[in-house]
Image (cartoon, helix red, strand yellow):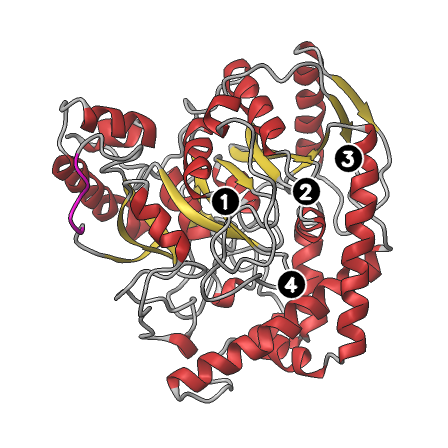
Amino acid sequence: MKISEYASCDAVALADLIARGEVTAAEVADAAARAVEAVNPQINAVVETWPPEDTPAPGSAPLAGVPFLIKDLGVAMAGKRSELGSRLAAGSVSPEDSYLMRRFREAGLVTIGRTTTPEMAYSTTTEPEFYGATRNPWSLDRSAGGSSGGSGAAVAAGIVPLAHATDAAGSIRVPASSNGLFGLKPTRGRVSQGPGADEVFSGLAVQGSLSRTVRDSAVLLDLIEGPEPGDPYFAARPDRPYATEAQLPPGRLRIAVLRQPWGGRQPTAPVSAALTETMRLLDSLGHHVEETPLGLGASWEEFVLGNARMWTANLAPWIDSIAAATGRPVDETTLEPVTLASYRYGHQVTADEFVRALTIRNQVSRTFAQHFARYDLLLSPTLPEPPVPLGVYGEGADQLDGLGWLARLLDRSPYTAAANVSGAPSMSVPLAEAEGLPVGMQFTAAFGREDLLFRLAGQLEQAAPWTHRKPPIRAAE
């Protein structure tokens, strides 16, 4: 199979070709390996590759034989390293599959390696010291986003059609926007975090994927959603498969538009223009689109402080457990300056301060619920600017404490984190470009309403297709 043919197929198409016998799983796996060799030296998105394990029989599972990459964090694959982008965890091997990994296998996916992530996924750019910066295939001097930047760059460059991703403050949607992909953050509790955790970062983090097509994300979410034994809570199961929802008309939706973020930097002129054009597109499709101020449920300063306390108070014991397992010290030899500063900040968060942070989480959740009593969806840019040059995040970062670093992250991504705090599902759709770089538009729905998002995403993919737009760095022969 030619690399160019492989890179042009989404996961559903590849699985169909394998099931019909037009190509073998071995030929597809070989094309994936050649794609890694062709582009990864330029973008540094894949940390490690593995020979494919026994591949499922053609047609035995919905995505049987499709090459897949997992993020170097958030999912455990038995016998494979999971190093979290950090020297502290270097060489760590997972003893067993997590529930999510088991579901990836049951879906028929053939996991061929792991992708880059910032240290501990603690950034929205992927520039770890441990294995170097991941470069955006649209422009090699630009960030691929984070924390799932390796997965985003790999999918955009045609290494795999879809890849695992996680999202605690925008880490699916930020790389989706940065790399011109579709990325949906599921509802809190939609996908199990077990058995190693009940919830991650006080419910802020969820599991999902990045893909080039809506149907790939929908099919995969159908295969991984649902509770596992011991889960503390879960979202109500969908009435229909998401793959079906993506083919249904959404009806006339009431869409509120947030142009100015609650805090952080304002959208650049090209991003603001892209938002206006998206509003025109939605209007032409029959939706009611209304630009309106929307409350957050807390001041921006309270929101940033609450997130910093939740993030760092969870980060500190996590780092301690890794250090205990590896026998390494927690200091400058094992952690980057901002991670170490955040670790120390987290150990200083008191129980009272942590509970107050959870109160902020509740206020934001209740406020969002009120918004969705009036509107079906909330639209905003995913990011206030196109992908930034590499190195921008790190300027003066060694002088920041845990609060200062989190404030910098939310300043760069002021639209995304509220959906994590509220638990609502949210997606980035690659509807625009600015200065030759991708610009994503973010749509957020009420808790548990991924069905609405997939219906609209399917309609937008038909009305304003994006798969013809390809980055300069892409697997081809």
SS under mark 4: loop
| Label located before the other in sequence (3 or 2) | 3
Left or right: where 134 falls relative to 3: right
Few, some or many residues within 10 Å of mark 4 (<14, 14–19, 20+): some
Image quadrant holding the N terminus, namely top left
**Residue sitting at x 67%, y 34%:** 271
The image quadrant of residue 153 is top left
Separation of marks 1 and 2 at Cα, in angstroms: 33 Å
The disc at residue 226 is 1
Give the spatial CA distance, label 4 vs label 1: 19 Å
Is residue 334 at least partly visible in the picture? no
Locate residue 264, reporting x and y percent.
Answer: 76, 52
Taking 467 as reference, is 47 above or below it? Answer: below
Q: Indicate the position of residue 353 as horizontal and vertical percent values.
A: 79, 74
Residue 259's disc is 3
Q: Earlier in the sequence, mark 1 or mark 3?
A: 1
**SS at mark 2 in the image:** loop
